[in-house]
Image (tube, grey):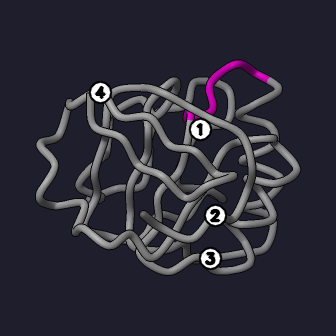
Amino acid sequence: MARGISGGKGTGELLVSGEAISFLSGVDPETGIVIESGHPLEGKSIGGKVLAFPHGKGSTVGSYIIYALRRNGKAPSAIINIEAETIIAVGAIIADIPMVDKPEKPISEIPDGSVVTVNGDTGEIIVE
């Protein structure tokens, strides 16, 4: 279980980063590719993935980048944060992306690439 932030259900392959993500200048809104130099996910697509990372960082414009990712069909199917903060939470809400934070079980215990369903209404994280 976790705390629901943005409602709905999203399923996809789990993509985990141990580092925060800046959506402004860190993720290309046209492709969904992480472009931040040196980031552990650099060069990977977040589109259709259940994206798990500690928290966001950077400008409040990051919320709009998350919305642009949705509009362009390149958004994650769900977001899991260790600790939600305003930039990511607002982005998930306006882009209608299910989001939870404060998971009971550390995400690092779930193998990268596992198929995961996030229910933002109930806070459930289900590994299939």
- Residue 74 against residue 81 in the figure, above or below: above
Horizontal side of 86 relative to 53 (left or right) equals right
Q: Which residue is drawn at 47% across and 57% down?
A: 80
Q: Which of marks 2 and 3 is nearer the N terminus?
A: 2
Q: What separation in Å lies between label 4 and label 1 (alpha carbons)?
A: 24 Å
Pick the residue in front: 126 or 30.
126
Tell me which amino acid carries mark 2.
Answer: Gly
Residue on which disc 1 sits? 28
Q: Mark 4 points at which residue?
A: 115
Q: Name the residue under label 3.
A: 58
Q: Distance between the residues labelled 1 and 3?
A: 15 Å
What residue type is disc 1 on? Answer: Asp
Going from N to C along the chain, the mark reached first, 4 or 1, is 1
Q: What stretch is highlighted in magenta?
A: 72-77
Q: Residues within 10 Å of mark 3 (few under 14, many from 20)?
A: some
| Cβ atoms under marks 4 and 1 closer than 8 Å | no
> In front here: 25 or 70?
70
Taking the image as shown, residue 114 lies to the left or right of residue 67, namely left
Q: Which mark's residue is nearer the viewer, 4 or 3?
A: 4
Residue in view at x 25 percent, y 60 percent: 107
Q: Position of residue 39 (x, y in %)?
A: 30, 58
Mark 2 is surrounded, within 10 Å at the Cα level, by few (under 14), some (14 to 19) or many (20 or more) other residues, namely: many
Q: Distance between the residues labelled 4 and 3?
A: 29 Å
| Label placed on residue 4 | 2
